[in-house]
Image (cartoon, rainbow, N blue to C red):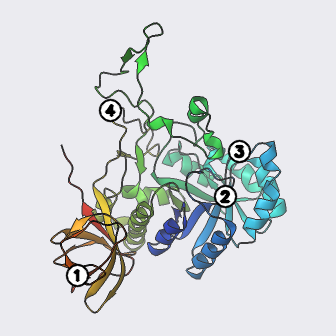
Amino acid sequence: MINKAELLSPAGDAECFESALKFGADAIYLAGKQFGMRSAPTNFDIETLRESVKKAHEKNVKVYVTCNTLPRNDEIDRMPSFLEETADCGIDAFIIADLGVMQLAAKYAPDIERHVSTQAGVVNYQTASFLYDMGATRVVLARELSLDDIAGIRAKTNPKLELEVFVHGSMCVSFSGRCLISSYMIGRDANRGDCAQPCRWKYHLFEEHRDGQYFPVVEENGGTYLYNSRDLCMIEHIDDILKAGVKSLKIEGRAKSAYYVAVTTNAYRHALNDYYVQGENWKLAPWIKEELEKVSHREYNTGFFYGGEPGQVTSDGGYIRKYEVVAVCDDYKDGTAYLTQRNRFFAGDTLDVLPPSGIPFDIKIESMFNENNEQIDAAPHAMQKLTVPTTTEIPKGSLLRKKRIIEK
């Protein structure tokens, strides 16, 4: 019997939340205005959270709220009211790293499930079982585990305890996301949601008495990116993940764009659905793998799942960006697509269309018109309203993309 898993997508704001809903998430994780491990995104105030939970539940999609920072004494005093207010919005679970917060959640939000964050660093069955006895219904395992390690935890824990793992997105030079580099270098505490990502910066060495004389750590003209981890991508190994007993497949990215959420959610949704149908004969459809090349990313890797470690990209700190979103389809009626421009494109361009929860297809823009119904050759203005005649239906909510010209 195939183990059906949950697809868990990130949302840093309401637009990302809508993308996750449209493109096939089973559950969405997000943060309130306090106690989340990502302070840079907009996140969700109480009213926005309440509205978002209602929308999600109408589609049988769950909502989990991250409460996974390591709070200090003054912060822990604010925790009870935060837990009560958030629980009142109807959320399905809290994601928690701190044992004190676990205890408070049991007291002030007893009806809400408690998931243990990857920040807790769970790497063995004894710890997982202890947390289950404390009331956890799920543990998000440390990213440093292999598939064999995960299968071992599954075999020796209560079947009611769910296991969740990250399958896609950024990785850190840290253990289970606990990193001190940002705190040491600029006083921004990564363990309280304020990471400056110094692991992505370029570094040189210099000798103490030769001020201003910098030396590359390795012989590269551009310096060296000492801590720059590859990105995780397990899209080709869905079968191995599920066979290890994982319940929830988590996509990293609460600080990333709605486009990233749409593409990654859509890709993993189709990969999972195909596996459910094909079983042991499952083969990843080529277009799904190609989709993940259409979002901004670093070199992909399978992380720690097959032993070893992912390593760093020491020669380049930049992202690979092959495509950009140029428009969003607001509606399609009677042979006309109604678009909102996001980046410049031209009449005559062939665009790649990603429909909600669908398979991408190409369309050529033969002609287009502005809001005054004047024919135009280019769409250079952000958020400009456009109409495009086409016999190919472009579903509402589709993202239209253009391949970037990469200069060598």
Task: Give residue 247's position: percent from left, percent from top.
Answer: 56, 62
Residue beneath label 2, please?
33
Q: Are discs 2 and 1 less than 8 Å apart at CB?
A: no
Front of the two marks 2 and 3: 2
Front of the two marks 4 and 1: 1
User: Type of residue at label 1?
Assistant: Glu
The one of 130 and 28 positioned closer to us in this rendering: 28
Q: In this rendering, would 272 be left or right of 142? A: left
Residue beneath label 4, please?
315
Give the quadrant of residue 299. Answer: top left
Q: Residues within 10 Å of mark 1 (few under 14, many from 20)?
A: few
Q: Earlier in the sequence, mark 4 or mark 1?
A: 4
Residue located 41% across and 35% down the image = 311
User: Type of residue at label 4?
Assistant: Ser
Give the quadrant of residue 357. Answer: bottom left
Residue 82 position (above or below residue 142): below
Q: Earlier in the sequence, mark 2 or mark 4?
A: 2
Q: Are discs 2 and 4 less than 8 Å apart at CB?
A: no
User: Does dot 4 land on a helix, a strand or a loop?
Assistant: loop
Q: In this rendering, would 48 be left or right of 213? A: right
Residue 73 position (above or below residue 85): above
Residue located 36% across and 32% down the image = 314
User: Does dot 3 land on a helix, a strand or a loop?
Assistant: loop
Q: Residues within 10 Å of mark 3 (few under 14, many from 20)?
A: many
Q: Earlier in the sequence, mark 2 or mark 1?
A: 2
The one of 192 and 41 positioned closer to us in this rendering: 41
Residue beneath label 3, please?
70
